[in-house]
Amino acid sequence: SIRDVIAVARNRGVSLVSAASNSLGNNNDSNPRYTASYDLDNIVAVTATTRSDTLPCYANFGLMSVHLAAPG
């Protein structure tokens, strides 16, 4: 599975940056989106921000599962 491949990469010191997804403001903590939501510490989940540095209505979020935000 994809999770297994990411785990092998983790064991080799590789990190993965993954989009948190755009599901109309889904909370990835309660409704996971993959690959961003796999329980591996080498995944960095990124969501989008607007020009005014706010979360757009389409961008997913998650206090525990989304790690950072960047202009999208």
Image (tube, rainbow, N blue to C red):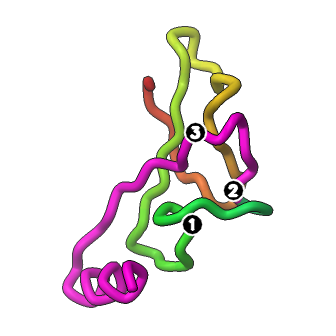
Placement of the N terminus among the 4 image quadrants: bottom left
Q: Which residue is mark 1?
A: 37
- Tell me the kind of residue under disc 1: Ser
Q: Please name the residue that numbered disc 2 is placed on.
A: 28
Which of the marked residues, 1 or 3, is nearer the chain's N terminus?
A: 3
Please name the residue shown 54% across and 46% down the image.
21
Q: Is residue 52 left or right of residue 29?
A: left
Question: Sequence order check: which comes first, mark 2 or mark 3?
Answer: 3
Which three-letter amino acid code belongs to the residue tagged 2? Asn
Query: In terms of image quadrants, where is residue 42?
Result: bottom left
| Residue sitting at x 47%, y 65% | 35
Label 1 SS: loop
Relative to 1, residue 65 above or below: above
Magenta stretch, residue numbers: 1-28
Question: Which numbered disc covers residue 20?
Answer: none
Q: Quadrant of the C terminus?
A: top left
* Residue pointed to by mark 3: 22
Nearest to viewer (mark 2 / mark 3): 3
Q: Is residue 13 magenta?
A: yes
Q: Is residue 32 magenta?
A: no
In three-dimensional space, the C-alpha distance between marks 2 and 3, rounded to whole angstroms, equals: 10 Å
Q: Position of residue 7 (x, y in %)?
A: 36, 86
Q: Give the left or right position of residue 54, taking residue 47 as reference.
A: right
Q: Position of residue 53 (x, y in %)?
A: 57, 18
Q: Position of residue 41 (x, y in %)?
A: 46, 75
Cβ atoms under marks 2 and 1 closer than 8 Å = yes
